[in-house]
Image (cartoon, rainbow, N blue to C red):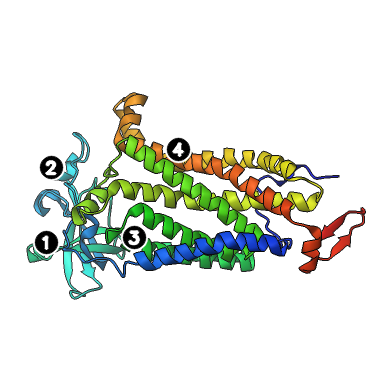
């Protein structure tokens, strides 16, 4: 009895791939080898050679920072301490004052905290300075706490250093270690390869994509080349070199191209500039030649890649498993069965993507809610429209990847011939139910 296709929904079990004929391997290679060669050529031509130099602005993320440690924290009068916190805002913009009636005690002479901080890195290692913290400040300091301090060389000596953030090195490293152990413990060798692929992805992002964009290369071209390199390395490393993986690569590539085209069309049509945050404003100020709308489009392509990999690999594997369960299934039946599985995947993945973007923009949505703005007003504002376009374009690409990958997988696996597979070493074996299957 043939298993129900729905029983395979959301499967991520990718067992040993069934051998395909030599002819099909040649066809797949004829498509993928030129693509891989083009990706390598793109990496060579666009390779940036490092982040370009610039004159530090001294604001936001462009400040020079060192490590520090809070030695002592004492309570002092805010009036005696000068009436204000020395903490600079993280974005480098003007410090926000508390609303009337909130936090006034600290500014009108209440109790503040004076932290003595020691610098633990850089040329001024061992130097100490005092940091005044208002009682209503969002970031409080404790004795023994590690901190990040910003350095302003042009300021008076007593004001050259200030606490800009907490040092989160230990908890972040511990969390990363727990994640790596969990992945390897459950995924074993495949989990280890997944971690290596993750490291390679970050290497491509930090050594190629980001510096190339800063050097002035077209952000979309850089994103497509970099994403393609990540896709080839990650998929083949995690799932092996096989026809099954190659079909997933083709499905991912076609979907990425669709996302790039749709993103380019609607970002231009909606007149989205991409300059909607302090970070993009600072980047534009430091590197005026960067196309921020192109940077937005590059972010859409890169952000969609991870979810696309999941969908295309799952759909390809589902079609292969269906064919193994019932070798008599035609390409049409395989496509229909695989598409039924894909519909469940579409529903969950699109919902996940939308909620992920909504969660990231939750503070912004709260501000619009407080302002009692209409839905149309909120959606028409650039900062929200940018997220809407990002979400919908990525979701359209995800939806399209299901039928595209499913039809490719159905055609490839159905075009194979048992005799050709046997010639490549796949020996038919009779099962207890009288059905032949391939090893």
Residue at the disc numbered 3: 210
- Can the viewer see residue 318? no
- Dot 3 crowding, Cα within 10 Å, few <14, some 14–19, many 20+: some
**Observer-nearest of 18 and 144:** 18
**Image position, residue 74 (x, y; %):** 21, 59
The disc label shown at residue 159, or none: 1
In the image, 389: left or right of 60?
A: right
Q: CA separation, marks 1 and 2?
A: 22 Å
Which of marks 3 and 2 precedes in the sequence?
A: 2
Mark nearer the N terminus (1 vs 2)? 2
Q: Earlier in the sequence, mark 2 or mark 4?
A: 2
Residue 195 % position (x, y) = 53, 65
Among numbered discs 1 and 4, the one appearing first in the sequence: 1
Q: State the CA–CA distance, disc 2 to disc 3.
A: 46 Å
Q: Are marks 3 and 4 in contact (CB under 8 Å)?
A: no
Q: Earlier in the sequence, mark 1 or mark 3?
A: 1
Q: Secondary structure at mark 3?
A: helix
In which quadrant will I find the N terminus? Answer: top right
Query: Disc 2 to disc 4, how far (Cα)?
Result: 49 Å
Please identify the quarter of the rendering in which residue 141 is found: bottom left
Q: Position of residue 49 (x, y in %)?
A: 31, 70
Q: Which residue is mark 2?
A: 108
For mark 1, give the secondary structure: helix
**Numbered mark located on residue 392 in the image:** 4
Tell me if residue 72 comes above or below residue 294 in the rendering: below
Disc number lying in front (1 or 4): 4
């Amino acid at each position: 009895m043939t298993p129900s296709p729905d029983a395979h929904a959301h499967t991520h079990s990718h067992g040993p791939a069934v051998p395909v004929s030599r002819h099909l391997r040649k066809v797949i290679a004829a498509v993928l080898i030129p693509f891989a060669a083009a990706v390598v050529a793109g990496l060579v031509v666009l390779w940036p050679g490092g982040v370009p130099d610039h004159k530090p602005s001294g604001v936001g993320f462009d400040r020079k920072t060192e490590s520090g440690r809070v030695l002592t924290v004492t309570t002092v009068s805010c009036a005696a301490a000068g009436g204000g916190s020395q903490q600079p805002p993280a974005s480098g913009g003007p410090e926000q004052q508390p609303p009337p009636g909130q936090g006034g005690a600290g500014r009108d002479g209440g109790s503040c905290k004076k932290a003595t901080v020691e610098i633990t890195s850089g040329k001024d290692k061992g130097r100490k300075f005092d940091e005044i913290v208002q009682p209503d400040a969002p970031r409080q300091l404790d004795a023994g706490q590690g901190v990040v301090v910003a350095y302003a060389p042009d300021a008076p000596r007593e004001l050259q250093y200030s606490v800009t953030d907490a040092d989160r090195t230990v908890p972040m490293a511990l969390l990363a270690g727990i994640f790596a152990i969990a992945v390897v413990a459950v995924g074993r060798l495949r989990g280890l390869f997944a971690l290596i692929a993750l490291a390679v992805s970050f290497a491509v992002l930090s050594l190629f994509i980001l510096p190339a964009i800063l050097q002035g290369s077209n952000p979309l071209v850089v994103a497509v080349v970099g994403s393609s390199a990540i896709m080839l390395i990650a998929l083949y490393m995690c799932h092996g070199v096989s026809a099954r993986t190659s079909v997933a690569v083709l499905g991912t590539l076609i979907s990425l191209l669709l996302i790039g085209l749709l993103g380019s069309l609607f970002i231009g049509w909606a007149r989205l500039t991409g300059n909607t945050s302090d970070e993009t404003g600072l980047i534009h100020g430091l590197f005026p030649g960067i196309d921020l709308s192109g940077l937005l489009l590059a972010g859409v392509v890169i952000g969609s890649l991870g979810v696309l990999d999941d969908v295309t690999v799952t759909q390809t594997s589902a079609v292969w498993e269906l064919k193994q369960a019932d070798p008599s299934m035609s390409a049409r039946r395989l496509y229909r069965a695989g598409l039924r599985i894909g519909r469940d995947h579409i529903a969950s993945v699109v919902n996940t993507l939308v909620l992920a973007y909504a969660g990231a923009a939750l503070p912004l949505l709260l501000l619009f809610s407080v302002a009692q703005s209409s839905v149309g007003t909120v959606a028409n504002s650039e900062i929200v429209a940018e997220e809407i376009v990002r979400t919908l374009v990525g979701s359209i690409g995800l939806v399209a990847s299901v039928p595209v990958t499913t039809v490719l997988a159905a055609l490839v696996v159905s075009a194979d011939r048992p005799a050709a597979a046997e010639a490549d070493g796949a020996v038919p074996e009779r099962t207890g139910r009288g059905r032949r299957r391939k090893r």
